[in-house]
Amino acid sequence: MHNIHLFSLKERNKWAECFNKLPSSIQDVYYTPEYYNIYEKNGEGDARCFVYEDGMNIALYPFMMNNVNVLGYELDESYYDIQGAYGYNGVVTSSYEPLFIKKFYYELQRYCLSNNIIAEFTRFHPLLKNEEFSRGYLEINYNRPTVYIDLINSYNVIYENFAHSVKSNLKKAKENNLSASIYKHEYPYKKEFIEMYNETMKRVNVISKNAYDTNFFERTFNNLPIIHFVIFKDNMPIASAICLAHNNYLHIHLEVSRKEYWYLRPNDLLIKEIIQYGSDNGYTKIHLGGGRTVSPDDSLLRFKKKFSNLTSDFYIGGKIYDEKVYTNVCKQWNDRYQHLANKYKNNILKYKFTDDINYIQEDSDHLFDYDKYLLKK
């Protein structure tokens, strides 16, 4: 006997009940109604969670649903697309049995077709490796490696594997009298974090659809399981990171710093503090994320790999549900935005790019110029 549910945030308690049926080892903040509530209130779509249960097996798939017509395309009726909220998404499940997967995608496709959903895009979770659930049902493509810390070893063992340059920079941070504080539940320096975020966005001249206002940060601090790390110089915050903490996983979500203090090496100290906290507090993995680009020589990736040589592959996936309408929308987009056509031609939701505004895929790529930081002496 199988059950199918589709929850909105009005039914967040039922969404949470289904989430809690998943094995604790795969529960992560990216799949919770609290996380999706942040992005729905930020105007990034209507949060939904598709759940399929068959006997003791369960699969849960949250996504944001967006109307395609509001982008200005001429269509005969209302059409939609779906994609996960910023961060990592895809299906989380208690079962990888082929028949269970087949039944799940049969029901999901029925739902999409009956609700005029034309296309789907997802960013799979590198640590959960949940792209395996979708192979054969979505077009899946390797994107880039991401870096993580396995906390099975003690912090001392992890520290010994830091690159020599990191150890040297940590020594410099100590000599420069930098200090660190960690905040949970109470966040006295969230105002300073927001100020550093806005300063950094102006400095790197990024206009992004992922640019967040004060209300977004207030909701993030107030409603998500946040650990806030702050690095100080003479009682002034000069670097800071918001980390998402849930069950086994600690993710660096957003990281900022004041450029004029880079020479003091606050960012090395910041990552070190996050790793030590995760080790001391029972997490199994810390996810540092990947680089800004797919290049193996990406400066952000190189910076992260100085703390760990462990990597996990990041995949993206997509599916077209209504080929006719999708082709029509893409043709209209190509005719109207020819100057964007080549840049975004490989993006399945290309028609959403109506301005040349960056979509930020990784945690804090737009907040920190790692090329310049790595060259600092």
Image: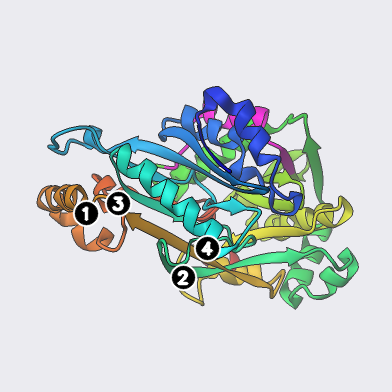
Residue appearing at x 22%, y 54% in the figure: 323
How far apart are the two marked residues, 2 and 1, measured between alpha carbons?
A: 24 Å
Q: Which residue is mark 1?
A: 323
Instruction: Give whichever of 99, 124 is nearer the camera.
Output: 99
Q: Which residue is mark 3?
A: 321
Mark 4 neighbour class, 10 Å CA radius: few under 14, some 14 to 19, many 20 or more: many
How far apart are the two marked residues, 4 and 1, measured between alpha carbons?
A: 23 Å
Q: Residue 206, position in %: x, y?
A: 40, 47
How far apart are the two marked residues, 1 and 3, measured between alpha carbons?
A: 6 Å
Q: Amino acid at mark 4?
A: Glu
Q: Amino acid at mark 1?
A: Glu
Of all residues, the one furthest to the left in this rendering is 335
Counting residues from the start of the chain, the first of labels 2 and 1 encountered is 2
Disc nearest the viewer among 2 and 3 = 3
Disc nearest the viewer among 2 and 1 = 1
Residue appearing at x 35%, y 56% in the figure: 319
Q: What is the quadrant of the N terminus in the image?
A: top right
User: From which residue to which does the magenta span run?
Assistant: 210-229
Picture quadrant of residue 94: bottom right
Of all residues, the one furthest to the top in this rendering is 10
Disc nearest the viewer among 3 and 4 = 3
Label 1–label 3 contact, CB within 8 A: no
Counting residues from the start of the chain, the first of labels 3 and 4 encountered is 4
Q: Which residue is mark 2?
A: 142
Q: Secondary structure at mark 3?
A: loop
Q: Secondary structure at mark 2?
A: strand
Q: Which residue is mark 4?
A: 131
Q: What is the quadrant of the C terminus in the image?
A: bottom right
- Is residue 221 a member of the stretch shown in magenta? yes
Q: Residue 374, position in %: x, y?
A: 60, 68
